[in-house]
Image: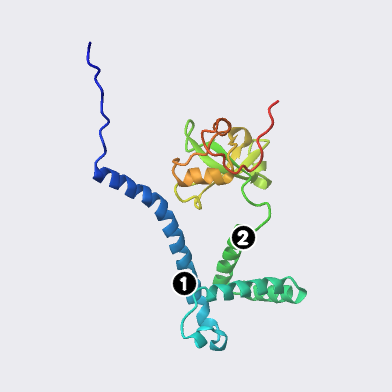
Amino acid sequence: MAKRKTKRKKKASFFHRTRTNFFTGIVIVAPIMLTFYLIWWAINLVDGLIVPWVPKIYNPSTYLGTDIPGFGVIVFLVFTAAIGALTKGLFGRQLLKFGENFVDRMPVVRSIYNALKQIAETVLSQSNNSFQNACMVEYPRKGIWAIAFVSTDTKGEVLEKMPYDAMLSIFLPTTPNPTSGFLLFVPREDVVLLDMTVEEAAKLVISAGLVAPPTAAEIAAGRKPAPSPKKPPPAAK
């Protein structure tokens, strides 16, 4: 009888196991440490800017003999909320209008203030100004597709000057920094809408394609954990 040849699985060396465990730990520990570091850095930054403006009589460090991390953040939050509540009233609106009129008379300061105000209103607005859907468009040429986000339906002069009945205003982000990108006006029929949420598409862009959300078929088959959906999938006809 022919002897059966049995292949023994080569046991990984101690160095190989240690290296694998180390990189596995890095994947887990690095995001946590980086998150705490950025939070701590932001707290110290705000404290450094705000605390010097607080009178010593109201500063707890005067009585405790040591600085309290986060005190400047609390002061900033309370002050900002008070300003927001003040501007809701008639007196506050008039005061804000007077201040903006004063700034408008200063050429350089006016441009900086208006630009920063527009950015803040765009980023912090809680209205329906966020991206509507994730999509794909052919960019930078035919046959090459890129992930983009639908901002709104194109309106006004841009649509009137184009030979299309309907167009979409989309934002095409860059990788790995999705805060920069390009504003494109694309015919509606050239835009492929995706089922994935805007958050999932952003992760796909930031990870350079490494973190791909599961498809509906993969979720149904249980091969991947189902993400928190933006809306329930349509019922089968």
Along the line of sight, the residue nearer the viewer: 90 or 114: 90
Residue 40 picture location, percent across and down: 46, 67
Amino acid, disc 1: Asn
* 80 to 228, vertically: above or below: below
Along the line of sight, the residue nearer the viewer: 138 or 11: 11
- Give the crowd class for mark 2: few <14, some 14-19, many >=20 residues within 10 Å: few
Label 2 and label 1: CA atoms lie apart by 23 Å
Identify the mark at residue 136; answer none if there is no mark.
Answer: none
Q: Decide: marks 2, 1 in contact (CB < 8 A)?
A: no
**SS of the residue at dot 2?**
helix
Q: Residue furthest top?
A: 1
Provide the residue designation for mark 2: 124
Q: Residue at point 48% right, 30% down? A: 143
**SS of the residue at dot 1?**
helix
Amino acid, disc 2: Leu
Can I make out residue 170 in this image? no
Provide the residue designation for mark 1: 44
Q: Quadrant of residue 97?
A: bottom right
Q: Residue at point 44% right, 41% down? A: 210
Q: Quadrant of the C terminus?
A: top right
Can I make out residue 68 in this image? yes
Q: Quadrant of the N terminus?
A: top left
- Give the crowd class for mark 1: few <14, some 14-19, many >=20 residues within 10 Å: some
Along the line of sight, the residue nearer the viewer: 172 or 85: 85
Q: Residue at point 47% right, 76% down? A: 48
Q: Quadrant of residue 11?
A: top left
* 69 to 1, vertically: above or below: below
